[in-house]
Amino acid sequence: MPKLKRDDGNERSTDVVESLDRGLRLLQAFGGAGGAMTLSDVARIADLPRATARRILFTLQRGGFVDSDGKLFWLTPQVLTLAASYLRSNQLVTVLQPVLDEISVVAQEISSLAVLDGDDVVFIARASPTRIFTGGVDIGYRLPAFCTAVGRALLGRLGDAELKAKLGAMRREALTPQTVTDPKRLLAAIIADRERGYALVDREAEPHFRSIAVPVRRYDDTIVAAINIGAHVDRISTDAMIKCFLPLLRDGAAQVRSQLL
């Protein structure tokens, strides 16, 4: 289930539209439901009073984002326009999608673009050599940053002290038997990844799946994203990933550097 974003209390109350915050939180609540929900379910998951949830649902229904049969509520395809607006306006997606397409065709594996969002990575673009996505992750999919190749490549932009504090504070649950959760081991691994310029994670985020990633830097050398190639463990070894896939990813990241502002 996606984390329900809440006000962290740093903004002045006069700068925050509370009703909008609650409406967005309610939309997020549907992400973990897997289907239609009753008013009571929505209110409980969104942590809102029932009367407040009811008003927000009716407002969203009038806007075409939610529909109802009088008992159950569900999202409509109109919600996708919110994600589409982000993807169309995001320079990273515009610039890197052709690069991902080329990498994927050459590697004959799925290639993805991810950004850091809190303690997670969010995949915002991907490419498949067949154009049919039969595996891997979807656009908008979230994974913990500490146990993914793209996440470790992105965490490498932090200084050692900041990285140590972040790893110590974040939730580190094992997703597979191979997941490294010890903060000291993770700190050493990410620092080593930063020095060599890539991260390779073997079956830590998903069973039977390994991934190699490099950071994407903009014109001023700031890391703004990461791109990866992932594959089933039966298709390629870690050594072959480094030999065959790493040059493709490095070339792709270097190709767009001057285009990213």
Image (cartoon, helix red, strand yellow):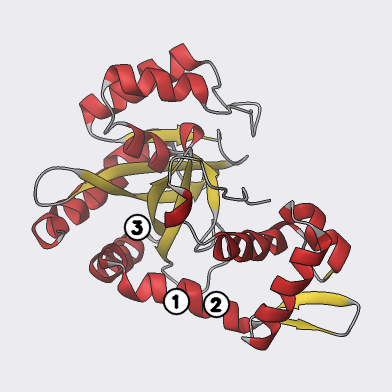
x and y percentages locating residue 109 in the rendered image: 42, 58
Residue most toward the top? 184
Report the Cα–Cα distance between label 3 and label 2.
Answer: 30 Å
> Closer to the camera: disc 3 or disc 1?
1
Inspect the image, locate mark 3, and give the three-letter code of the amino acid beneath it: Ala
Q: Residues within 10 Å of mark 1 (few under 14, many from 20)?
A: few
Q: Residue at x 35, y 33 (%)?
A: 155
Q: State the residue position of label 1.
A: 84
Which SS class for mark 2? helix
| Whether label 1 touches label 2, CB < 8 Å | yes
| Whether label 3 touches label 1, CB < 8 Å | no
Which SS class for mark 3? helix
Q: State the residue position of label 2.
A: 80
Q: Quadrant of residue 19?
A: bottom right
Specify the label residue 107 is tagged with.
Answer: 3
Residue most toward the front? 14
For the question of whether residue 131 can be seen, the reply is no
Report the Cα–Cα distance between label 3 and label 1.
Answer: 28 Å
Which SS class for mark 1? helix
Inspect the image, locate mark 1, and give the three-letter code of the amino acid beneath it: Ala
Q: Residue at x 21, y 25 (%)?
A: 195
x and y percentages locating residue 157 in the rendered image: 26, 33
Which quarter shows the C terminus? bottom left
